[in-house]
Amino acid sequence: MKPIDEIAALYRKWEMPRTMEEDIKAHLCNGYVISTPDFFVMGRAIARYAAPQAIENPWFTFRREHHDAWLVYAFAGSSRNFLSFVPYPLRWLAWQRRGKPLRFHELSTFTRHASNQSLCESSA
């Protein structure tokens, strides 16, 4: 199954506030949608300490000077090259799993992990 199909299956399985097509359109207008054979991601730049309703609404845009985190709204597939598609560096990376609170982690943690992982893979 292709990563975009995995996301579509989640939209069919769970009750969502919008359709997948509406969320893709919102992220095309206010964020980013990247679809490759290896992964699919929708996300946008946010302000970490904004109201959760603003963060979770893909139609809400934050002023560029307030951007301090990337919200990964939907993701499926291989994370191997994920960081190479980050449009510009921000301190935080955020995501929310179904029924769980929004989580923030420093982007540098993922950058280090990805570097270590690729070093291990190239030496194998």
Image (tube, grey):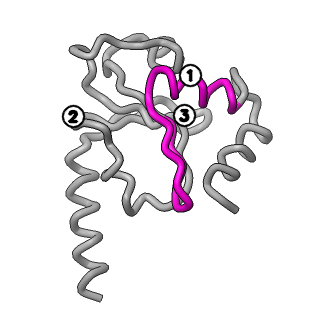
Which residue has dot 2 on it?
91
Type of amino acid under label 2: Arg
Residue depicted at x 43% and y 58%: 79
Type of amino acid under label 1: Ala
Q: Residue furthest right?
A: 12
Q: In which quarter of the image is the N terminus?
A: bottom right
Whichever of labels 2 and 1 marks the residue nearer the N terminus, that label is 1
Residue 42: x and y in percent read: 51, 37
Residues packed near mark 1 inside 10 Å, few (<14), some (14 to 19) or many (20 plus): many
Type of amino acid under label 3: Lys
Q: Which residue lies furthest to the bottom in this view?
A: 124
| Numbered disc in front, either 2 or 1 | 1
Q: How far apart are marks 2 and 1 (CA)?
A: 23 Å
In the picture, the disc for residue 100 is 3
Residue depicted at x 45% and y 33%: 32
Residue 103: x and y in percent read: 40, 34
Above or below, 91 relative to 17: below
Q: State which region is magenta.
A: 20-42
Which residue has dot 1 on it?
26
Q: Is mark 2 in CB contact (under 8 Å) with mark 1?
A: no
Whichever of labels 3 and 1 marks the residue nearer the N terminus, that label is 1
